Amino acid sequence: MFIGVAASAIGFTAWPLIVPILFILCGLDLYLTLFSSLLVDCGNSLVMTLIAAKHRQIDIRRGLLLAVFALIWIAGGIAFGKAFIPGNEDFFRGSAGIITIIIGILFILKGVKNKTATGRNPGPVKKNSNPAAMNKADGGFRRYLIYCGVAMMAFQIGFFGIGGGMGYAIFLMLFLSYPILKATGTAMLMTFFSTLFAAGGIFFLIPDSAFVDSDAQLLIPMMVGVSMIGTAGGAKIAYSLTDRQINFLIGSVVIFAGLLASAQKFIIQLMF
């Protein structure tokens, strides 16, 4: 449920919270674990894409273009992971969450800096008919850097099974100057196709023996469903806040997720 709320705020991935629990504590096969995490992210991104489209906080054309570009790098990540993962499964035993905490702090600082935000945020995205103004809004030369960022994030999606929504959203804000809601909506459109493609590729790497566990067959769809409910509920909150308040929401959620991931890693190290 918490992952769903975090996904609605900034596209947070299930990976740092779900993978250590399913892989270490529950003893699931690693490929099945990555597949499960990707399904959670895929379900969350579908819900958020539909909500963002309803509120017109999504750039469908650019999102689809970048999603198609990302598939190439995801395929490369899956191929690289197929060679890397079998001898390095300990790499997936936990996440320190330090980078996540730093990102959360930056959003808090952005919210503190933005003292002039008033009113609610989810107004429709207006199209600009002036090409020169559109190029300026896209960030000039910076708009070409989005492809580098997407390639880097997409490779990690295929390699590690990370959802990538938050990374996509941050790159859209940095390189294309998208506002938070539009960045998150567009990123979740990209994440839906990215995670669906990655999950399909990783599915064929799961050994047949991993599907024998009937508890896992019940657990996975339950996780996906509950997380999607959390995404829908979190979106209602996000779309009722001002831009400044959204920064505080994202910062708080992301910092908490980073602390939780770090605590999980510490506990797992004590247990194993």
Image (spheres, helix red, strand yellow):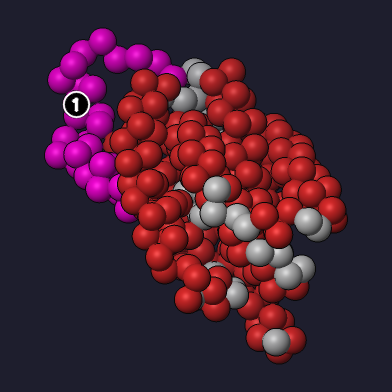
Residues in magenta? 125-154
Query: Residue 119 sits in which quadrant?
Result: top right
Is there any visible trace of residue 73 in the rendered image? yes
Q: Image check: 15 left or right of 222?
A: left
Q: Image check: 193 left or right of 46?
A: left
The residue furthest front is: 208
The overriding secondary structure of the stretch rendered in magenta is helix
Which residue sits at x=52%, y=60%?
104
| Residue 21, x across and y down, in percent | 71, 67
Which residue sits at x=83%, y=48%?
218
Name above or below for residue 228 compared with residue 218.
above
* Residue 146 sits inside the magenta stretch: yes
| Residue 75, x across and y down, in percent | 38, 46
Q: Image check: 121 left or right of 235?
A: left
| Residue 221, x across and y down, in percent | 77, 43
Query: Residue 45 sits in which quadrant?
Result: top right
Quadrant of the frame with the C terminus: bottom right
- SS class of the residue under badge 1? helix
What residue would you read off at disc 1? 135
Which residue sits at x=54%, y=74%?
89
Is there any visible trace of residue 19 in the rendered image? no
Question: Which amino acid, mark 1?
Answer: Asn
